[in-house]
Amino acid sequence: MRETIAAISSAMSEAGIGIIRISGPEAMQVICKIFRPGKKEKDILSVPSHTIHYGYIFDGEKTIDEVLVMIMKGPHTYTGEDTVEIDCHGGILSMKKVLETVLKNGASIAEPGEFTKRAFLNGRLDLSQAEAVMDVIRSRNEYALQSSLEQLKGSLSEKIAEIRKDLLYQIAYIESALDDPEHISLDGYTETICNVVDTQRQKLAWLLDHFSDGKLIREGIRTVILGKPNAGKSSLLNTMLGEERAIVTNIAGTTRDTLEEFMNIKGITLHLIDTAGIRNTEDTIEKIGVERSRDMADKADLILYVVDSSTPMDENDEEILPILQGRKVIVLYNKTDLSPQISVEEVSQAVQPHPVIPVSMVENKGLDELEDTIEKMFFSGSLSFNDEVYVTNSRHKEALTEAQDALQLVTQGAELGMPEDCLAIDLRNACEALGRITGESVSEDIVNEIFSKFCIGK
């Protein structure tokens, strides 16, 4: 029998209300020891499930807090077990006092993600739904939240289940035919299995092809701001954020390290990274900053290359141009409020085929066009969430890729006339890979690793 666990499930802050969650076979006994109902309240052991009750938490004869207690009896709870939630006054000290009292009276402190892990082990959620719980909590924008909620409802699980069902049927058919060849024939089966596998491979291909969209929805567009010193990179960051986040001076080399912030445009998150100006320098610290700028550019989804229109392009710009090759880049023709020393046409010629947008941080010009260009560049001008399932998890992508490779071996084997029992091996490998997404074929070590990344209390 699993032990009864407890943890603080709300933020550790001076909030108005704090929540302590208890789950397990002894949850009702624990709350019975420490809860005294208010006037006209029933004994807590006799109340119906899914009801809320007013009273006090006591440690012996000492009053700990005035609370509301929610009683939820399994299996119709988040974990599938008897669950009690105590709504106490917010504040770190009051929540810790209530939790300490709960632990003194029979509960054990929960491990990270243990409530959701129990929901998975008790069949309330599959593994992809459990992972979506943390994605909901960590969502940075509306689209990420909606995508996570769709997965929490089981949209990805349903897709995977459909594919596995068809593949498992083929495995069963092959095994039945091999066991009873007199009644089940494999004549002409090659064409059948090729058609089935081709259909399922197309479904997997769609999910894999849209992984990059899902990753951007979930994590945001990793946007690196590049340029030579004093081009206006930090001013761009401050203007986009609407606050003075980066130090701005007219001294070249002010920014010596990366500075990272998040912002939302048109419902999608930009992970903005301001970098040190790229130039040849003998300053040891600045040189390290320049190398970090190059490293960040290599990992970027998008580069915003800021060109200072008030000075000619020079050898520092020449250092940057090769970095832009083969990448998604938007060039910002900056400081249009000053007299230009280089024209838009000259910059366009130097950076082609990348788009060039005239901007001024002083006059706050060009940022609307920048946002529109980012939207078109990443979402084909149409940024509307629909009912399609987006894979956002790298673990899921790895499993889908493995399943896709296994199905390709099935097709190749069928075309080469390999025996059906050999085809069944690759079909099983595909099913096993897909089962790792939902948790139907996953090791205990992987399960533990996944839930170790959760916060305590969830």
Image (spheres, grey):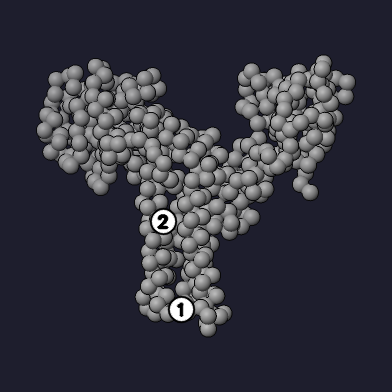
Badge 2 crowding class, 10 Å Cα cut-off, few under 14, some 14 to 19, many 20 or more, is: some
Label 2 secondary element:
helix
The answer to whether 311 is drawn above or below residue 16 in the figure is below
| Residue 289 x %, y % | 37, 36
| Residue drawn where x is 65% and y is 39% of the image | 78
Residue wearing tag 1 = 186
Residue to which mark 2 is pinned: 204
The C terminus sits in image quarter: top right
Q: Quadrant of residue 59?
A: top right
Whether residue 330 is visible to the viewer of this picture, yes or no, is yes
Q: Return the x and y of residue 320 as percentages of the image width and height.
A: 25, 40
Q: Amino acid at mark 1?
A: Leu
Question: Quick check: 386 above or below 445?
Answer: above
Report whether 97 appears left or right of 445.
right
268 or 414: nearer the viewer = 414
Q: Along the horizontal axis of the image, is 371 left or right of 413? A: left
Query: For this view, does 266 lie left or right of residue 109?
Result: left
Q: Residue at x 23, y 34 (%)?
A: 331
Is residue 286 in view? Answer: no
Residue placed at 43% from the left, 58% from the top? Answer: 401
Image location (x, y in percent) of residue 47: 79, 29
Which residue is farthest front?
183
The amino acid at mark 2 is: Leu
